[in-house]
């Protein structure tokens, strides 16, 4: 058997692994609060390299510490490196546990680096006839490359490797591998902090080495070099050159107490790996273990289902008893237009699958699904409700929605793919849609229809199996009421709103499109005239050249690719260059034109001239709803040009009108309630202008008339900044004032509203103690970084702890108001329809004759949604368009 040794540079690869998934640091945290991103990426790397190299022997070498024989030679060796992030160092011991599970030896040696262990074992293995592959993130190890030793350097993340053989080293550097240490000796290494020769970089070093072979060769022939600054530097830095070469040289004869026989790959110990993956919450890796797969395959093999047909559907429907699990399959994401591909229905392990959705329209199934007395378990009730409605079928009696329940249990982790979501809860017995249908353009039904049928049956089984698990978690979290009384019924309200849609005046949109284009054309010509030439205004590189090279404007900021032309830069230039202001106007109008005018025209339904948005109920961590395809919550309101787009949102007919109602300063009212601050509550109870009232307090004013518009603006920024846990730096940036002034504002605020300060301190303490915070309705947000050693991560978690109960409670209140409003419209037998929810605002359409009724009814219902220590305030308006309601 050919012997093949794999050597992994443990610290180097772990470091790369950590930063490969650094952007998802918050996501990779196990149930004990341990960050796991480096472990996850390292595990992925192991799977890749073991599959690629199929080694017979393996070793992962780690550094034993910062003090080595190199630091004895040069005290500043690696001295400039930042301290290893705590979030990485806490993971390193667990990498060794992972390696034990993989049957791979790990090793460290006091006074030596991992490089020296790898170099020593590589030479021993080479001498013994082994083929050797080294995996590292450090190109210094390329000096070890020989005909038998390949150094594989991570290129992107940890899974893409560049193989350095002697030939590849020569192709890259025109040097032999052993000359890498000479190159390092001359050029030094900023990463390891050794100096090399002053002003000699890699290119110069390579040129010298091609001529003289080595550092020694250069100095033996130094007199032959003609006089130059480089020669002077070589003469002056002789000791540095030889020291640097010594530091760069990997010791291939370190006193490693290992034999090659000790490095034989033992194979995976799946029992240990199963325990490890459970501890790390690595469900995807766990699902790949054969002992898990065997159990899964056995359970899937035992999964029984029958096929529904026109002949048996009536008899089967009559046999189904409560609770019934139902799943409607739609492969496309937009369920307002997606084709229904099949469904599964059944009860506690008895499943019936159909690929013909026309069977849903049979009287027996229609009656069963519409019967509110028969409980239904589903996945994504809103999607299911809309999909069935498009088939002419009603859905009632839903008591469990796997998607909603999972979202409430932990808003940090969720998925619209039932298979992926099930894995989050340790459930292995259902495949992901991607595994069955593919992804992207290749997505489609499997050729073998039984694969599709089994997948549907497995989904039904997963919904049924996870129902008691998640309902218990909701009960333990005191979230049953949040689930059953708010989120489940709200999903149906949102479904009705989506189905109703909002009518669009296409002629108005086209009119605005023409007006905006005329203005854009004018602005473009003005920009060209100011620049003195035509250019691509959308190209930041071309624009940067015009502004800072041709027009000689002061450079505010640079980027990796050139000059920054960001909004902040252009704002700074407005005062001295009219072109900057015109470019800002151009960008604003262009965005309105492309995102809103053109974007809205694309999604108007051709049959009813309406837009049917989709509300995402399980996306945000605060509980706020978001809107997509299109996003109707982002239709501009503050910008006058943007506001005009609202003129295109009209009621269904001329004798109807648009009616809107919104909560005034709901988050500040929630803050007053939660904090119990008497001064803040008094301002709301007395009906004062809260921002003017705050201005009087933080500026020490005696009379309301002393408050200037700018003071009120600054006080407003402080009020809302406090809600979001703003720092003095953040406030100073928002207001364009000094940090000292911003700090004074915040200190004055907390002096005047002392219980608000007490609340912010108490809620952070609570978050540290229990790992999460809650809204008034027990919606939870877990904060895994509340104990992070990294200041930025910890600070963000603290600000989130302060804000979530406020913003989340405000989101809950508007949801309760929507539920009550829907009941009130039905109770009053009104034709009025709730169309949109935009943060703290509800938009309706109604016959003009019903507008006076709504003007009284809606504020009453919204005000009564929740009882706070301060009064709620609801503003209303109506008009011929959404634009006019604010008139």
Image (cartoon, helix red, strand yellow):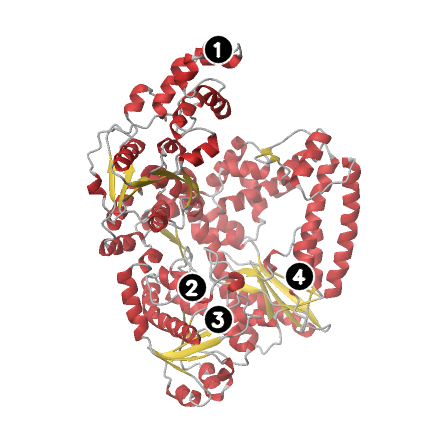
> Image check: 665 left or right of 175?
right
Question: In this rendering, which labeled residue sits more in front, label 3 or label 1?
Answer: 1
Q: Residue 598: percent from the left, percent from the top?
A: 69, 58
Q: CA distance from mark 4 to mark 1?
A: 75 Å
Residue 511 position within the rendered picture, expressed as x and y whole percent measured from the top left: 77, 60
Corner quadrant of residue 64: top left
Indicate the secondary structure of the residue bearing disc 4. Answer: helix
Q: Are marks 3 and 4 in contact (CB under 8 Å)?
A: no
Per the rendering, the mark at residue 435 is 2
Residue highlighted by disc 4: 600
**In the drawing, what numbered circle is on residue 445?**
3
- The numbered dot on residue 224 is 1
Q: Callout 1: 10 Å neighbours few (<14), some, many (20+)?
A: few
* Separation of residues labelled 1 and 2 (CA atoms): 67 Å
Residue depth check, mark 2 versus mark 4: number of the one nearer the observer: 2
Of 659 and 164, the residue lying toward us:
164
Give above or below for 8 relative to 214.
below
């Amino acid at each position: 058997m050919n012997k093949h040794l794999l050597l992994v540079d443990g610290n180097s690869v772990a470091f790369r692994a950590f930063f490969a998934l650094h952007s998802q640091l918050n996501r990779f945290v196990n149930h004990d609060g341990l960050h796991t991103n480096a472990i996850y990426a390292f595990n992925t790397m192991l799977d890749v390299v073991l599959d690629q190299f199929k080694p017979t022997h393996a070793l992962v070498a780690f550094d034993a510490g910062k003090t080595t024989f190199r630091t004895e030679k040069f005290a500043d060796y690696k001295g400039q490196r930042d301290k290893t992030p705590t979030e990485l160092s806490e993971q390193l011991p667990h990498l060794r546990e992972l390696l034990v599970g993989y049957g791979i030896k790990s090793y460290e040696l006091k006074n030596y680096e991992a490089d020296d262990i790898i170099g020593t074992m590589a030479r021993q293995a080479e001498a013994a006839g082994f083929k050797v592959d080294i995996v590292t993130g450090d190109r210094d190890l390329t000096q070890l490359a020989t005909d038998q030793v390949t150094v594989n350097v991570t290129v992107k993340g940890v899974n893409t490797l560049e193989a350095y053989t002697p030939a590849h080293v020569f192709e890259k550097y025109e040097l032999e591998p052993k000359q890498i240490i000479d190159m390092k000796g001359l050029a030094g290494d900023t990463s390891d902090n050794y100096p090399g020769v002053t002003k000699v970089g890699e290119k110069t070093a390579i040129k010298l080495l091609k001529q003289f072979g080595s550092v020694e060769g250069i100095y033996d022939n130094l007199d032959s070099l003609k006089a130059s600054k480089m020669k002077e530097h070589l003469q002056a830095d002789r000791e540095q050159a030889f020291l640097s070469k010594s530091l760069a040289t990997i010791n291939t004869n370190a006193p490693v107490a290992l034999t090659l026989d000790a490095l034989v790959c033992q194979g995976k110990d799946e029992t240990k790996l199963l325990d490890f993956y459970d501890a790390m919450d690595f469900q995807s890796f766990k699902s790949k273990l054969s002992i898990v797969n065997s159990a899964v395959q056995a359970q899937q093999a035992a999964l029984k289902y029958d096929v529904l047909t026109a002949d048996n559907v009536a008899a089967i429907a009559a046999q189904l008893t409560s609770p019934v699990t139902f799943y409607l399959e739609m492969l496309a994401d937009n369920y307002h237009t997606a084709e229904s591909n099949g469904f599964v229905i059944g009860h506690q392990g008895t499943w019936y699958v159909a690929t013909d959705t026309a069977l849903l329209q049979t009287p027996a199934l229609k009656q069963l699904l519409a019967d509110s007395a028969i409980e239904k378990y589903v996945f994504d009730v809103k999607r299911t409700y809309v999909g069935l409605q498009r088939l002419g079928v009603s859905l009632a009696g839903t008591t469990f929605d796997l998607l909603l329940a999972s979202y409430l249990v932990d808003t940090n982790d969720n998925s619209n793919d039932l298979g992926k979501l099930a894995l989050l809860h340790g459930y292995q017995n259902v495949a992901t849609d991607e595994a069955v249908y593919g992804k992207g353009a290749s997505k489609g039904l499997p050729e073998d229809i039984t694969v599709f049928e089994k997948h549907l049956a497995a989904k039904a089984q997963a919904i049924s199996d996870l129902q008691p698990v998640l309902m218990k978690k909701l009960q333990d979290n005191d979230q049953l009421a949040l689930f059953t009384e708010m989120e489940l019924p709200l999903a149906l309200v949102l479904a009705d709103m989506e189905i109703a849609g909002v009518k669009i005046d296409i002629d108005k949109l086209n009119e605005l499109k023409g007006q905006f284009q005329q203005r854009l054309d004018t602005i473009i010509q003005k920009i060209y005239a100011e620049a003195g030439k035509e250019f691509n205004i959308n190209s930041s590189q071309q624009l940067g050249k015009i502004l800072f090279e041709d027009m000689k404007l002061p450079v505010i900021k640079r980027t990796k690719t050139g000059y920054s032309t960001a909004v902040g830069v252009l704002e700074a230039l407005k005062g001295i260059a009219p072109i900057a202001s015109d470019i800002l106007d151009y960008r604003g109008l262009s965005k309105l034109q492309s995102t809103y005018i053109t974007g809205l025209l694309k999604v108007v339904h051709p049959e009813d001239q309406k837009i049917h948005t989709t509300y995402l109920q399980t996306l945000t961590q605060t509980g706020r709803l978001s809107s997509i395809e299109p996003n109707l919550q982002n239709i501009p309101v503050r910008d006058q040009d943007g506001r005009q787009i609202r003129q295109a949102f009209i009621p269904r007919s001329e004798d109807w009108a648009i009616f809107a109602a919104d909560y005034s300063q709901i988050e500040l009212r929630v803050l007053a309630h939660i904090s119990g601050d008497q001064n803040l509550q008094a301002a709301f109870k007395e009906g004062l202008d809260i921002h003017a009232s705050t201005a009087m307090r933080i500026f020490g004013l005696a009379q309301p008339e002393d408050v200037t518009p700018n003071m009120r603006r600054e006080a407003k920024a402080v009020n809302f900044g406090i809600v979001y846990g703003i720092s003095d730096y953040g406030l100073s940036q928002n207001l364009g004032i000094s940090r000292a002034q911003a700090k004074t504002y915040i200190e004055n605020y907390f002096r005047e509203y002392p219980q608000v300060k007490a609340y912010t301190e108490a809620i952070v303490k609570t978050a540290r103690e229990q790992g999460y915070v809650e809204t008034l309705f027990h919606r939870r947000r877990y904060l895994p970084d509340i104990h992070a050693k990294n200041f930025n991560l910890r600070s963000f978690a603290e600000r989130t702890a302060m804000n979530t109960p406020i913003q989340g409670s405000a989101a809950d209140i508007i949801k309760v108001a929507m539920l009550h409003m829907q009941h009130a419209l039905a109770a009053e037998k009104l034709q009025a329809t709730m169309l949109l929810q935009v943060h703290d605002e509800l938009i309706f359409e109604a016959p003009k004759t019903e507008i006076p009724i709504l003007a009284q009814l809606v504020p009453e219902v919204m005000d009564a949604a929740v009882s706070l220590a301060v009064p709620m305030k609801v503003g209303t308006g109506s008009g011929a368009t959404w634009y006019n309601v604010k008139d």
